[in-house]
Image (cartoon, rainbow, N blue to C red):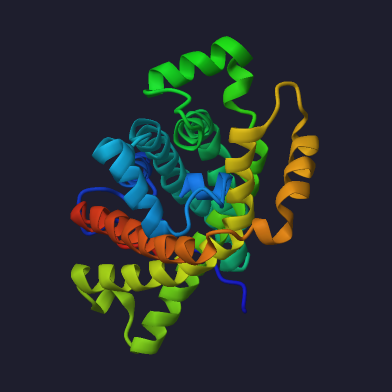
Amino acid sequence: MAATKMEGRAPSKGNIELFSPTYFAACGLGGIVKCRRQVDPNIYTSNFSAWRSIFAKEGLRGVFFGWAPTLIGYSFQGAGKYGFYEIFKYYYGEKLFPNTNKTFVYLGASASAEFLADIALCPFEAVKVRMQTTLPPYANSLREGWTKVTAKEGIGGLYKGLYPLWGRQIPYTMVKFATFETTVAEIYKFLGKPKESYNGLQQTGVSFLGGYIAGIGCAVISHPADVMVSKLNADRKPGEGGGAAMSRIYGNIGFRGLWNGLPVRIAMIGTLTAFQWLIYDSFKVSLGLPTTGGH
């Protein structure tokens, strides 16, 4: 693949200049818009039985239990991930390494963005996992869970899953963004016309398809670390080192246990990633900005 320079600064179709501070802020805003079975694979016989059991015992509230840390945590993470990605992609590809292969730019920009975004996500992920995987629930609200963790373990208790979270999310995001960008470029190449010849609705349709394909790769590469993060947050003993905890957990579940629930994750992440790109690029189009990829 030949080295290619990223696109330079240019006005968008709307009133926002590409790669301006307002552009990056808009991209960040655009980014805003499974656990029990991983911790104990024997607790339910299937996903449908799990949903049926939770609903029967806990009602609708049980199905959506832990929504607050999920919503807030992933909103912060989404804003950081997409916003920082646009920033790093521009500066790596246009300013620092202008003649670098685009794929390396996508990989470096997405890794850098996810590194920062996970720092914001980690405390909320820690509370969410404890709420959703402990029976009876560790806490009944985000505030209660946050208070209990910090009172017992300090602020560090909210970040004890940060390293495995990076291990899960950074490869996930690198695959997500690099595969998406490459897939979208190949789709336009297959269609035989430049991206600019298609309207906004058609471009977002390409984003949806590219996002689904990227999501399949994301699910596979991140699943073992996702299982380990859930296990660590639910089963790490006080004072136990991260390496020791992971070694003990792996000894209990083995290599096969790291892949528990993968088919469901593929279906979920593929669809989720497709809709993430659809929402994100639809938001950009509504501001008069070009969709992601295909340049």
Residue drawn where x is 51% and y is 15% of the image: 148
The percent coordinates of residue 290 (x first, y second) are 30, 61
The percent coordinates of residue 216 (x first, y second) are 48, 68
Q: Nearer the viewer, residue 287 or 69?
A: 69
Q: Can the viewer see residue 7?
A: no
- On screen, residue 42 versus residue 76, left or right, reads right
Q: Is residue 262 above or below residue 52?
A: below
The percent coordinates of residue 104 (x first, y second) are 62, 63
The percent coordinates of residue 237 (x first, y second) are 70, 27
- On screen, residue 287 versus residue 125, left or right, reads left
Number of marks:
0
State the image quarter where residue 232 is shown. Answer: top right
Q: Nearer the viewer, residue 100 or 208?
A: 208
- On screen, residue 13 versus residue 97, left or right, reads left
Q: Nearer the viewer, residue 110 or 175?
A: 175
Residue drawn where x is 47% and y is 60% of the image: 265
Q: Nearer the viewer, residue 117 or 156?
A: 156
Q: Is residue 122 above or below residue 152?
A: below
Query: Dividing the image into 4 quarters, which one contains the C terminus?
Result: bottom left
Residue drawn where x is 65% and y is 42% of the image: 164
Q: Is residue 94 above or below residue 190?
A: above
Query: Dividing the image into 4 quarters, which one contains the N terminus?
Result: bottom right
Residue lying farthest top? 151
Q: Can the viewer see residue 15?
A: yes
